[in-house]
Amino acid sequence: MNENEILAMYEDAGALLNGHFILSSGRHSARYLQSALVLMNIDNATALAAELITKVDADQVDMVVSPAIGGLVIGQEVARQLHKPFIFTERKEGEMQMRRGFSIPEGARLLVVEDVITTGGSVRECMAVVREHGGEPVKVLAVVDRAPDVDGRFDVPFATAISLSVETYAADACPMCSEGLLPAIKPGSRGSA
């Protein structure tokens, strides 16, 4: 599957949005990728996970983990295709945590899977929780990297199905805000940072 086919999936699902958006990092952008609309189609989820697992050695992974909520569907499907257990981290009162009775065996190697990454904040928080519980994050996979020009977001290898360079702005430096063109909306799964 090539990048054009993946982008077509987003476009066909009405998931590549143009406007004035507030990302979960608090940054602003004129484009937004709503992966939930793509992943609601099980054929899309299956195909995207199949693409992602080509970028990992299954023998080097014991479990798959995703930060909730964006990474849940793709993380579960990657785990299913790799025949590995799947867990997730989630925020409670603003703090990323492992809940629901999940546990990580000491020294377990975890693959971290996310739908879309820009700053990588949720993934770093998820990795910190994994480490606190005795696990070792070994690689990060994401369907889309929105900031391919940003290096050093993670201290483990990182791979994506598609890189899509989308400019983002600090809220106080957003040209759309200063021009008053469109009101900023927050379409994602959580409030701004």
Image: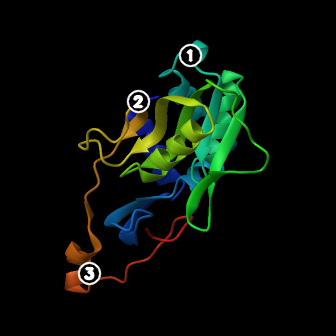
Q: Secondary structure at mark 3?
A: helix
Viewed as shown, does residue 172 lie left or right of 113? Answer: left
> Helix, strand or loop at disc 2?
loop
| Residue at 36% over, 71% down | 19
Res. 134 image quadrant = top right
* Residue corresponding to mark 3: 177
Q: Are marks 1 and 3 in contact (CB under 8 Å)?
A: no
Q: Residue at point 40% right, 70% down?
A: 22
Camera-side residue of 58 and 10:
58
Image quadrant in which the C terminus is located: bottom left
- Residue type, label 2: Val
Question: Alpha-carbon neighbours of circle 2 within 10 Å: few (<14), some, or many (≥20)?
Answer: few
Residue type at mark 3?
Cys
The foreground one among 72 and 30 is: 72
Q: Position of residue 107 (x, y in %)?
A: 61, 23
Outermost residue to the bottom: 180
Q: Residue 51 at x, y = what percent?
A: 52, 28
Image coords of residue 29 (percent x, y): 32, 65
Residue that label 1 marks: 60
* Foreground of the two, 170 or 136: 136
Q: Earlier in the sequence, mark 1 or mark 3?
A: 1
Label 2 – label 1 distance at C-alpha: 13 Å
The label number, if any, that marks residue 190 in the structure image: none
Q: Which residue is mark 2?
A: 156
Disc 1 secondary structure class: helix
- Between residue 38 and residue 56, name the one nearer to us: 56
